């Protein structure tokens, strides 16, 4: 795992400027650095290295191919690179290897098969920049699912690119301004979906694509080498025809292979463990093929609503891992907040960014690589919204829309507090069946009632601010994959549509962004075995009934896990990896938030509808409503803006 940056300039290229870009990424790669410049072509590549494979100077980057045609800076891991070396040998290519890095393997593949064909043969996560001397062109590439980030854009006469925005911002040509349209997306999604970016003139390279920019031209082309949408459509149209038992066996075989490859490292390696289905499956299959106890890590909280540490400890004890846990206080978590604008670099407001950073920080004290269980929910049907779509939406949508709208308005005409008071006797009579915050639950149900169709239902369920254009002054919310993608209703169930949209948007733009920045912020490489593209492709071939059974998700994945871990250690209500932001904003964070949400300040900065923000803030601190998510969106932008 590393940091890359560079430029292709129509003016003079400066080695000093590109070094400065790389220095901003030192946290991503503190072990080594390098710069390569071709002044005649106006191209410069820089690299910060986190040494994972081949710790010798033979792994130094930028690196040239055996033919000297290609020069690369690479961020990521190619897990099957030794198999690729064997394929090269079988093709009659006799490479005189300098070392055993996967970057060297890629370059030899480029010489033999070309860039695109090599990447199609590769299994891994990556972002890279390649200068092709023969064709005088720059090629940028990103992995299939979007594990590794890559930003790019023209700034004056310089085409800049880098792993994080701070690298682009360090170049003297950078002059961009805040993109209000992207800010509107942040207010809806708590992240900014690719290809959009908070800075005008800058974009994120989409997963599974290449960008090609010829020397002397300003227009670039973007081509898709792996399409998540096509994988989804192919899998649903041509489903797995085997029995449930065969599905479990096949999935386990694929996961064992993926995890085995991802355990390859020349440095200490471990795994995050929450005690849930996803992380427990990864750790169980790691331990099954390890000759020594796997190092596992979890954090705990004093607040039982957010604490999974005891469950993780029980799973670790059963599997025999070398487990480390850290209980953090509110003050520990609060101390992270000032670091978030620099850590995430682009405004990002998924509150689980805080515990993700804390567990990464703790793991880095013991290992340099950590595997995680991310993506299990999206691939195997784990989120509540899938259950709503599969179980409730069909019944609800059969009720005429005018009646549903009337019911929705009736529910929201009373505040959540009023509903809590009216129905308090039911909570006392049925404490285990009635939620403690029944008013908030009813208001969420009102959102479902009033939806026109499944796509609108999904948009509402994943939205924070329902009308970002009213909130962000001068903004026009752009279309995203959620609004553009067309999944055939006669082929896809509503639950599968939501899973597909999550895999294409929420997963790379929120979950993987969160994990990458948290890990790389402490120089920890994170790996996600569920995102081996062969696992992803098989998961989409599985019929929905192999994932969702009797109202419980991830059936096929649970069956794999239960071969290694008893059910009673796993079966419990799903718990998010969140924080008690709701109470912090009314307590220890109140002064900080009040400063950022000050009415005069908001008017002076001119980004938000002041009355909308202040109303939400007043209702929250008076405990009339819980607006933690909406306020956190605004606060994370405000904190980021202050840092700029």
Image (cartoon, helix red, strand yellow):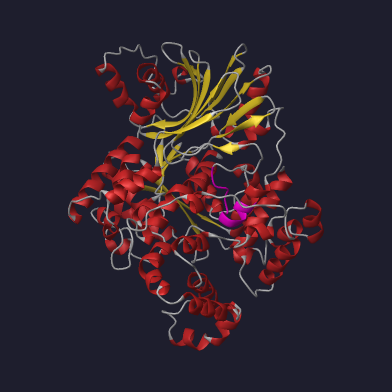
Quarter in which the C terminus is drawn? top right
Residue 473: name its quadrant: bottom right
Q: Answer above or below: position of 27 versus 496.
A: above
The front one of 275 and 191 is 191
- The answer to whether 578 appears left or right of 544 in the picture is right
Name the one closer to the observer, 577 or 294. Answer: 577
Q: Position of residue 144 (x, y in %)?
A: 41, 38
Does the stretch in magenta take in 576?
no
**Residue in the foreground of this view, choosing between 411 and 357:** 411
Give residue 419's position: percent from left, percent from top. 56, 82
- Write the residue at 61% across / 25% down: 218
- Residue 319: x and y in percent read 30, 51
Tell me, yes or no, if residue 320 can be seen here: no
Kindly identify the residue that appears in the image at 62 percent across and 27 percent down. 159
What stretch of residues is rendered in magenta? 184-194
Residue 409 in the image: state x and y as whole percent.
57, 78
């Amino acid at each position: 795992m590393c940091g890359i940056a560079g430029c292709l300039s129509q003016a003079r290229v400066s080695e000093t400027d590109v070094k400065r870009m790389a220095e901003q990424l030192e946290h991503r790669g503190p072990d080594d650095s390098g710069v390569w410049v071709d002044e005649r072509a106006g191209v410069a590549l820089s690299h910060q290295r986190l040494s994972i494979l081949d710790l010798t100077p033979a792994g130094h980057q930028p690196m040239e191919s055996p033919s000297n045609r290609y020069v690369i800076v690479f961020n990521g891991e190619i897990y099957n690179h030794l198999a690729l070396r064997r394929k090269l040998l079988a093709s009659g290519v006799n490479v005189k290897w300098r070392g055993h890095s996967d970057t060297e393997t890629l370059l030899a593949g480029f010489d033999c098969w070309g860039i695109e064909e090599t990447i199609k043969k590769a299994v891994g996560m990556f972002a890279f920049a390649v200068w092709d001397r023969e064709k005088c062109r720059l090629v940028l590439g990103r992995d299939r699912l979007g594990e590794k980030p890559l930003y790019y854009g023209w700034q004056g006469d310089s085409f800049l690119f880098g792993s994080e925005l701070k690298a682009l911002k360090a170049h003297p040509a950078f002059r961009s301004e805040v993109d209000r349209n992207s800010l509107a997306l942040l207010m809806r999604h708590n992240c900014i979906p690719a290809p959009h970016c908070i800075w005008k003139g800058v974009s994120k390279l989409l997963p599974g694509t290449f960008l090609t920019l010829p020397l002397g031209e300003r227009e670039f082309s973007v081509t898709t080498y792996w399409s998540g949408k096509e994988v989804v459509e192919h899998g649903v149209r041509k489903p797995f025809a085997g029995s449930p038992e065969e599905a479990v066996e096949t999935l386990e075989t694929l996961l064992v292979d993926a995890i085995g490859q991802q355990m390859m490292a020349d440095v200490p390696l471990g795994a995050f463990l929450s005690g849930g289905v996803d992380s427990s499956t990864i750790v169980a299959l790691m331990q099954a093929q390890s000759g020594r106890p796997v190092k596992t890590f979890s954090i705990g909280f004093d607040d039982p609503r957010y604490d999974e540490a005891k469950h993780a400890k029980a799973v670790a004890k059963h599997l025999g891992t070398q487990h480390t846990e850290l209980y953090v206080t509110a003050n520990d978590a609060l101390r992270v907040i000032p670091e978030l604008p620099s850590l995430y670099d682009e405004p990002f407001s998924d509150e689980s960014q805080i515990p993700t950073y804390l567990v990464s920080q703790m793991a880095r004290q013991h290992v340099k690589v950590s595997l995680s269980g991310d993506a299990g929910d999206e691939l195997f049907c784990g989120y509540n919204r899938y259950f709503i779509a599969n179980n409730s939406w069909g019944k609800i949508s059969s009720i005429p829309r005018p009646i549903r709208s009337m019911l929705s308005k009736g529910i929201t005409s009373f505040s959540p507090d009023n509903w809590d008071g009216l129905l308090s006797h039911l909570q006392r009579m049925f404490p285990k069946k009635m939620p403690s915050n029944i008013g908030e639950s009813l208001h969420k149900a009102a959102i479902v009632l009033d939806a026109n169709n499944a796509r609108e239902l999904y948009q509402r369920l994943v939205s924070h601010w329902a009308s970002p254009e009213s909130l962000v002054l001068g903004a026009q919310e752009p279309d995203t994959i959620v609004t553009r993608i067309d999944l055939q209703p006669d082929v896809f169930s509503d639950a599968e549509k939501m899973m597909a949209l999550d895999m294409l948007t929420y997963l790379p733009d929120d979950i993987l962004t969160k994990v990458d920045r948290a890990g790389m912020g402490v120089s920890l490489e994170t790996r996600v075995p569920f995102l081996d593209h062969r696992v992803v492709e098989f998961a989409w071939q599985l019929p929905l009934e192999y994932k969702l059974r009797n109202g419980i998700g991830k059936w096929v994945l649970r069956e794999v896990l239960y071969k290694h871990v008893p059910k009673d250690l796993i079966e419990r209500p799903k718990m998010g990896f969140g924080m008690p932001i709701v109470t912090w904003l009314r307590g220890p964070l109140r002064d900080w938030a009040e400063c950022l949400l000050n009415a005069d300040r908001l008017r002076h900065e001119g980004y938000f509808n002041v009355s909308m923000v202040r109303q939400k803030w007043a209702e929250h601190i008076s405990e009339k409503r819980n607006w933690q998510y909406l306020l956190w969106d605004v606060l994370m932008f405000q904190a980021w803006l202050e840092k700029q």
